[in-house]
Structures are given as structure tokens and as C-alpha cells.
């Protein structure tokens, strides 16, 4: 079991900048001890191949893509893109170097989630994404209480096979740049230390001139993550 580490921006699906707007998804690896069997050098036990042979740096490569057509990802070969997602739990063929990351978009996507996620893991997926912008009515639109109960039901059972992301909060669609933060805090409270979360996922939308706001947002999320949960010996991260 490794020592606790400082939260850091560890990557995220859909990292793209198109002036004058920033539209990006990022994630923060939680500042807790490494998951069972995972050291800072290599995985030794507790998680299946390919996690069993991957270093921690490989597990959290930063550059990823969001896409609607997997064929479009071929344009990014050689661009150090290592993973991608398409807001669903199943996808077409991706280049071998790109890890597909399934997402449980919302409660309307649960019927095939477990089978799809297990199939993706068998094919090499090492990460799973929870609900898409549950803090926005036009997206997953879930209360923190419902999201927590559903995360426990659908995400926790897969935590011994892949790294689990938090619901992906937003900062946009309102006058408040921090609208998702309050939702995430309520989600963690509703979890009552029972939700397995290995990294915090968030979406950011703003004018490209507001990079300082993005920095503050990341710092706020890192502070929230640093106060959530602890990892008992031999058990996964839970919040």
C-alpha cells in the first residue's frame, strides 16, 4: 500500500480547446492511498490484466478524446492520445493504443451497463465513468441522493476490475462557475463512505480568457477530494 499522494490533474476524456471557448473534461485522482495491490511502481495483485501489468503512470495517462464516431479517432494517431469515450457503454473498433472508457450516462442506460462494462474490461478497459452531468436537468439530471445510491448499485460491483470515476459534474449552463461543486459535495455526503470513487471527473465550459477561473475550480475540487474518505487496509477507495 503506497503512501497518500497529493491530488493532481490526472487526465480526462475530451480535453480540447477551441478559442474563444474552453470545453474540457478533466479528472482528479483522489488523494488517498493507492488501491489494493497498486504501488507507485506497478500493480502486483488485486486487479486483472491489463491493470496487473500496468504502471501507475500508464494507468493515469492524461490525453483522451470524446467522439461520436470511433473512426474519427484515427486522425489522432501519433498525438499521444491513450484513451477515449463516447458517452455510452459500448463502442466500435478503436485504434489499439486507445483505451475505450465506458460511461454509465444515466439511469436510462442501466439495462446493459454491467454486461457492457464487463465486456469492455475483458477487452482491456481499465477505467469506468459514472453519470454524465447529473447536476444539469438536460443531462443525467439526478439528485445527489439518487446518484449515490445508483453509483453504489452499478459502479461499486466493478471496482475490483477497474478504476471508478465520480459522476461528471459541470460548471456551465448557469451564472455560477461552481455550480457542480455543491452537487458533488452533496453526493459525497449522500455516499456516507459507501461509494467507490478512484478519481473525480468534471466538465468545464468558459471563455478561453478565464483560465484563472479554471485553476480555482480545480483547486476547489482538489480540496473537496482531499477531505473525502479514507482507505482501510485491503479495501478499495470509498467516499
Image (cartoon, grey):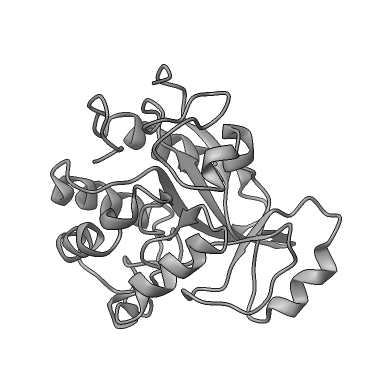
The quarter of the image holding the N terminus is top left
Residue at horizontal 74 percent and vertical 55 percent from the top: 81
On screen, residue 39 above or below 66: above
Q: Position of residue 74 (x, y in %)?
A: 81, 70
Total count of labels: 0
- Res. 213 visible in picture: no
The quarter of the image holding the C terminus is top left
Question: Could you say which quadrant of the image residue 152 lies in?
Answer: bottom left
Q: Nearer the viewer, residue 57 or 186?
A: 57
Residue at horizontal 39 percent and vertical 66 percent from the top: 133
* Side of 57 relative to 81 (left or right): left
Q: Nearer the viewer, residue 213 or 123?
A: 123
Q: Position of residue 202 (x, y in %)?
A: 46, 54
On screen, residue 112 above or below 174: below
- Res. 94 visible in picture: yes
Q: Position of residue 150 (x, y in %)?
A: 21, 65
* Side of 160 relative to 101 (left or right): left
Q: Residue furthest top?
A: 3
Q: Position of residue 176 (x, y in %)?
A: 39, 57
Residue at horizontal 62 percent and vertical 34 percent from the top: 57
Q: Nearer the viewer, residue 94 or 45?
A: 45
* Side of 21 relative to 239 (left or right): right
Residue at horizontal 30 percent and vertical 38 percent from the top: 236
* Side of 142 relative to 22 (left or right): left
Amino acid at each position: 500500500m503506497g503512501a497518500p499522494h497529493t491530488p493532481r490533474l490526472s487526465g480526462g476524456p475530451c480535453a480540447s480547446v477551441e478559442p474563444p471557448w474552453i470545453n474540457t473534461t478533466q479528472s482528479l485522482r483522489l488523494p488517498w492511498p493507492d488501491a489494493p495491490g497498486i504501488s507507485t511502481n506497478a500493480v502486483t495483485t488485486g486487479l486483472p490484466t491489463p491493470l496487473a501489468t500496468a504502471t501507475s503512470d500508464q494507468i493515469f495517462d492524461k490525453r483522451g478524446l470524446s467522439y461520436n464516431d470511433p473512426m474519427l479517432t484515427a486522425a489522432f494517431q501519433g498525438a499521444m492520445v491513450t484513451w477515449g469515450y463516447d458517452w455510452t457503454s459500448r463502442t466500435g473498433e478503436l485504434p489499439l493504443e486507445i483505451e475505450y472508457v465506458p460511461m454509465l450516462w444515466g439511469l436510462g442506460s442501466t439495462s446493459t451497463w454491467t454486461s457492457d462494462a464487463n465486456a469492455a474490461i475483458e477487452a482491456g478497459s481499465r477505467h469506468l465513468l459514472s453519470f454524465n452531468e447529473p447536476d444539469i436537468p438536460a443531462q443525467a439530471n439526478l439528485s445527489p441522493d439518487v446518484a449515490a445510491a445508483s453509483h453504489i448499485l452499478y459502479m461499486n460491483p466493478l471496482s475490483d476490475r477497474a478504476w471508478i470515476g465520480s459522476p461528471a459534474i459541470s460548471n456551465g449552463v448557469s451564472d455560477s462557475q461552481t455550480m457542480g461543486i455543491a452537487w458533488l459535495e452533496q453526493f459525497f455526503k449522500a455516499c456516507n463512505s459507501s461509494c467507490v470513487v478512484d478519481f473525480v471527473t468534471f466538465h468545464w465550459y468558459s471563455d478561453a480568457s478565464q483560465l484563472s477561473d479554471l485553476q480555482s475550480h480545480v483547486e476547489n475540487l482538489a480540496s473537496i477530494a482531499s477531505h473525502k474518505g479514507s482507505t482501510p487496509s485491503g479495501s478499495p477507495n470509498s467516499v
